[in-house]
Image (tube, coloured by chain):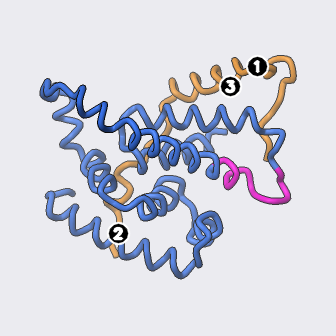
């Protein structure tokens, strides 16, 4: 079955969004202090 | 983090459409995951599964909240008419697909979000949704067929 149309909503994250997300996570309490990393 | 961000944002685009809300919900998901990262157990699930479990909860909470607030939102709705940008967006293929997805039952939309948004296999979806792999395949096949019919009826390319 042709499902190419099902991919019409896929996008790469906007670089500005990815940057803003990183900043938001850094702003979460304790992050700077612990220099924590993502699990996995 | 980039591939997780992509999978999460795209899965929300398939759940809530192509607008900025998909990014807002992704931010919320990542913040919840970041705060709860000490509880992540590598031996129980992959990181992507864990993150998508949180994303699912965020999506369910959003749906509940919308249902709770719908009457008030409708009462406050002022028919301004769409802006030119909204007209262009509404005609795009992404918006067309989002409209078709919005009409699906929650479970079907969730399966589509995991497969086409997050790029998961039927096996991984089956584990998360507590369905058999065959069941996932059958439901997705039927759902895509229905969406295809709607897509063709709307003149999508």
The residue that label 2 is drawn on is B144
Q: Residue at x 23, y 43 (%)?
A: B92
Q: Which chain is orange?
A: A
Q: Which residues are magenta?
A: B41-51
The residue that label 3 is drawn on is A25
Q: Nearer the viewer, mark 1 or mark 2?
A: 1
Q: x%, y% of residue B4?
A: 62, 44
The residue that label 1 is drawn on is A29
Alpha carbon distance from label 3 to label 2: 36 Å
Q: x%, y% of residue B102?
A: 32, 52
Q: Residue at x 12, y 28 (%)?
A: B81
Alpha carbon distance from label 1 to label 3: 9 Å
Dot 3 lies on which element?
helix
* Mark 1 vs 3: CB contact within 8 A: no
Q: Residue at x 22, y 61 (%)?
A: B151
Instruction: Mark 1: give few (<14), some (14-19) or many (20+) Cα within 10 Å.
Output: few
């Amino acid at each position: 079955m042709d499902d190419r149309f099902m991919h019409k909503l896929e996008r790469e994250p906007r670089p500005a969004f990815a940057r803003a997300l990183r900043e938001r996570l850094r702003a979460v309490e304790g992050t700077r202090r612990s220099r924590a990393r993502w699990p996995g | 983090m980039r591939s997780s961000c992509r999978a999460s944002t795209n899965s929300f685009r398939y759940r809530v459409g192509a607008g900025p809300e998909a990014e807002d919900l992704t931010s919320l998901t990542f913040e919840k995951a970041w705060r709860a990262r000490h509880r992540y157990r590598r031996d129980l699930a992959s990181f992507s599964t864990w993150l998508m479990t949180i994303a699912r909860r965020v999506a369910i909470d959003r749906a509940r909240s919308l249902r709770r607030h719908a009457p008030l939102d409708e009462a406050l709705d002022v028919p301004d008419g769409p802006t030119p940008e909204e007209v262009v967006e509404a005609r795009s293929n992404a918006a067309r697909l989002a409209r078709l997805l919005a009409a699906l039952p929650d479970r079907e939309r969730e399966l589509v979000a995991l497969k086409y948004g997050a790029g998961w296999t039927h096996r991984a979806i089956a584990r998360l949704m507590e369905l058999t792999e065959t069941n996932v395949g059958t439901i997705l096949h039927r759902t895509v067929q229905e969406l295809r019919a709607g897509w063709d009826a709307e003149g999508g390319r």
